[in-house]
Image: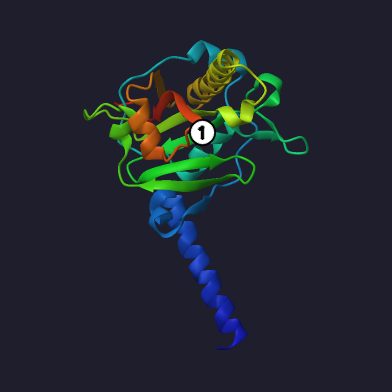
Amino acid sequence: MRMDTFLAKGICTGMVLAALVAQGWLAVAEEAAVIPLSVPRMDGGLPLLQALKARKSVKEFSKQPLNSESLSNLLWAAYGINRPELGMRTAPSAKNKQEIAVYVVTADGAYLYEAAANRLKRVATGDLRKSTGAPESAGAPPLELVYVADSKESAGTTEEEKNLYASITTGCIIQNVYLFCASEKLATVTRVVSSPDALAKTLGLTKEQWPVMIQSVGFPRP
């Protein structure tokens, strides 16, 4: 095959994949175990005080999924890397343990957010939202964020401290998401984990990991 023909085919393939991702980030999920995210936006949005004023919990969602860009921006705001030279995050953690992992659960599967690489790693396929306790009504959220603590990341602390630190870090991440959703006119609400053992099995967690909280995100139901 001539090199120019090969390159042309490669460019066309890349354009097709880009178009699929633009239409919905899960369009190529079945073909890839790792899904790169677009570069997140780190400026703009509502001023902080306006976002605080607009912050609220919304329990009913439309079926419209978030596109690739919105998902990338959401995850970065939640717990992304904001100081790459130091590996620091948008949410604080005690002693910089960074003991929380963010999992994304949708109608197509479950994914681990890898902040340093800015990508999603698939951990399970299929509609697993029932495992998070998401409501089955017409207003069910299209996206669930599951915040998972890892005791290995908080070594050197007592069990009480591990639970306390994990809860505080999770709370900071949750507020980041609330403010992002307020700025982007998205709906969000937090829930306790009703069946932690079942959810841990669904996500393939280790015995050192446990789900702390769940946060639903989507567009508000008209």
The colour style of the image is: rainbow
Residue 24 visible at all: no
Tell me if residue 151 comes above or below residue 39 in the rendering: above
Tell me if residue 208 comes above or below residue 124 in the rendering: above
The residue labelled by disc 1 is: 102
Tell me if residue 84 comes above or below residue 151 in the rendering: below
Q: Residue at x 37, y 22 (%)?
A: 193
Tell me if residue 58 comes above or below residue 68 in the rendering: above
Question: What's the residue type where badge 1 is placed?
Answer: Val
Q: Position of residue 43 (x, y in %)?
A: 65, 32
Kindly give the residue lying farthest to the right in the view shown.
Answer: 85
89 or 213, which is in the foreground?
213
Image quarter of residue 215: top left
28 or 102, which is in the foreground?
102
Judged from the image, the secondary structure of the residue bearing numbered disc 1 is strand
Judge from the rendering whether residue 59 lies leftward or rightward of residue 157; answer left or right.
left
Judge from the rendering whether residue 65 lies leftward or rightward of residue 152; answer left or right.
left
